[in-house]
Amino acid sequence: MNDLLKDGDMLPVATIAEHVTGQRPSRPTIWRWTHKGVSGGVTLDAVPIYGQWQTTKAAFHDFLRRRSDSVLRSRQTVSLAADADPPADGLL
């Protein structure tokens, strides 16, 4: 188990997300965050408790930070690729 889940109160992911972002995520969104990940595979550390995915505020904030870092890295990569010289044969 992630250290961020060991310390702090376990609360439903939807409750924490709504408190932090002002929007309550749907069940499919929570499943995607915890299983598939977002922004290049960044997943939310959470555990199922009585049929509901739960996490801590610290783990949720860590998820948002890692997601933002991933988005910024991908934008830098796209920016660097856009700045590169076009191929010699003129094809993009």
Image (cartoon, grey):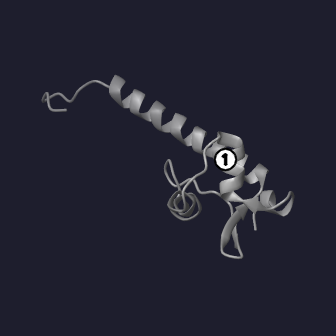
Q: Residue at x 67, y 69 (%)?
A: 52
Dot 1 lies on which element? helix
Q: Residue at x 84, y 63 (%)?
A: 6
Choose between 5 and 10: the one closer to the eye: 10
Choose between 30 and 46: the one closer to the eye: 30
- Above or below — where is 89 with respect to 17? above
- Above or below — where is 57 with respect to 86? below
Specify whether 9 is left or right of 55: right
Mark 1 is on which residue type?
A: Glu
Query: Residue 74: percent from the left, percent from the top?
Result: 47, 38
Choose between 49 and 34: the one closer to the eye: 49
Q: Residue at x 61, y 44 (%)?
A: 23
Query: Residue 2: percent from the left, percent from the top?
Result: 75, 62
Q: Quadrant of residue 51?
A: bottom right
Query: Residue 67: percent from the left, percent from the top?
Result: 58, 44
Q: Which residue is mark 1?
A: 18
